[in-house]
Image (tube, grey):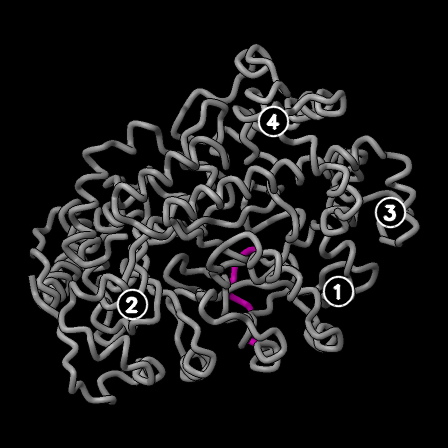
Amino acid sequence: MGTFVICNDAPKRFHKNFRFFFSRPEKWYSCKRFKAMSNFKSSGVALPIFSLPDPYGIGTIGQGAREFIDFLSDAGFRYWSLLPLGPTSYLDSPYQSTASKALNPYFIDLVDLKERGLLEPRELNSLDWGADPRRVDYGKIYENRMNVLRIAYKRFLKGKGEGYQRGYTSFIRQSNAFYDYSCYLSLKERFGGVAWYDFPKPYNLYTPSLFRRTKKENLSDVHFHLWTQYIFLRQWDALRDYAKKKGIVLVGDIPFHVAYDSVDVYRHPKNFRLGKDFRMTESAGYPPDVFYDRGQAWGFPLYDFDYLKKSGYRFLKGRLDLALSLYDVVVFDHFRGVLENYRLPAGSQDGLNGTWEEGPGEDFLDTLRLPNERIVCEDVDFRSDRMQEILLKYHYADMRVLEFAFPREKGNFNKPSNYPYPCYSFSSTHDCLPLRGYFESLSTEERGKALEELNGLCFHFGVRPSTEIPSEMRRAVLELNLASLSEVAIQNMPDLLDQGAEGRINDPSKSSGNWRYRITEEDLSKSLSRSLRRENDFYGRSS
């Protein structure tokens, strides 16, 4: 393989993005060769919780998650990149949550509840959780999951649930963080699942007295939803402790925007630019990009940054504080929204008719003082001089995606030869076709150009060149990710499994059928683990 050398007399102008690292010569000037950088360079895998193996229809934060952590550790990885953990609603998207400061009860480990006497085996095994172990059947999950949790809750109230009884009373007394979510969900259930703006009067407009009345009228339901948050946190704490013992860093994702049908907007409408009766007249979206040539209409309400500024951005700070308490590293999704936001008329079907407007910028970042060592700024396929200045000023790592580099014009910031050290490089993302599927989708001309650029980079990094076979091109891209200078190289799990279109997690151009991807226990084989360990060892990224 090729050797990357940082000599003792390396000039400080070596790369403009390294300038704040050269102030620490004890860490950099002693690095003689690429492989010697294993203390500084790591790798990881991107896989959502819902994609994990589990006997009851959807991945959870229980045994399946611990086994995946074992797999990562054995394979030499150090990072696990997750999608948001919030409760989902319309279209099952983790970016369309009913509460940005709550946790998805679907991810509670039912096996753990069974082992603690809160559920009987027959109560789980008699239900239909879906026929395909590689796809989440959200219809079945919706039908069965909450009903099973209510059975467990009733047994919990009778004193069962060894290990969970102690601490629950204190949690209920101090559960202000989840009180709003629990009241809101009980109201949605009461009114047939409609959004808050379609609640009957007077429930369609939030008041503190209305929530007090809701709690009184629906005390059992409110406490049940609080209990799901308690159980999730207890299981999550156990999972984090397990990950820490195994040396695995949990990387979480926080969406910039929040859903209109959420307790966030219902409870705090003045944080958003809404019209009469708090109806949306404009919404957030994105212009045509690498994912969809007609752009995207997200349907999220736009923030009123002037109003937020008066409170010191308390609403956004609370969301970030929760994320930092859950994860070791936080991916700040759509970081471009800090700089500028794309405004569309409400009800837009695509992103063709929007305009850009300025975001809160440095005032927001100065106020929040985010810990730079724990923040990764995501906005794939976008870079500007202002974005670069922000990243350098605040020492934030950013995110690169290798799939977007082939075929691309020279100098594209997603090309591995252009990576600075402080970045997280992803082979592909949850919104992408997996690498093999992507190369299969290219025309003969496009694939030929991609192969030429790919092999040029292989020569540069000392990676074995590829043939025109899509699976081989995938292999070369994964190795380039490991060989690059990025601090953390994240491999998307469908790429590691050499999957095509069937491994896509989300297609932004489609409004349904997304977020269903799952792996099986057979995918986490010892042979794959050993192969990935050899690659991580070879490129100096083993944990």
Q: Where is residue 338 in the image (x, y as percent from the top left)?
A: 55, 73
Q: Mark 4 points at which residue?
A: 145
Verify CB contact (< 8 Å) between mark 4 and mark 2: no
Circle 1 residue: 274
Q: What residue type is labelled 2?
A: Asn
Q: CA gap, disc 2 to disc 3?
A: 48 Å
Pointers 2 and 3 in contact (CB under 8 A)?
Answer: no
Which residue is nearer to you in this view: 11 or 300? 11
> Few, some or many C-alpha atoms within 10 Å of disc 1 (few <14, some 14-19, many ≥20)?
some
* Residue marked by disc 3: 211
- Main SS of residues in magenta: loop
**Crowding at mark 2 (Cα within 10 Å: few <14, some 14-19, many 20+):** many
At a point 71% along the width and 26% down the height, the residue shown is 153
Mark sitting earlier along the chain (1/2): 1
Position of residue 112 relative to residue 171, above or below, is: above
Q: CA gap, disc 4 to disc 2?
A: 41 Å
Callout in the foreground (2, 3) = 3
Q: Any mark on residue 75, and which? A: none
Answer with mark 3 or mark 4, whichever residue precedes in sequence. Answer: 4
Quarter of the image holding residue 173?
A: top right
- Total marks shown come to 4
Q: Mark 4 is on which residue type?
A: Arg
* Marks 4 and 1, how far apart at CA: 34 Å
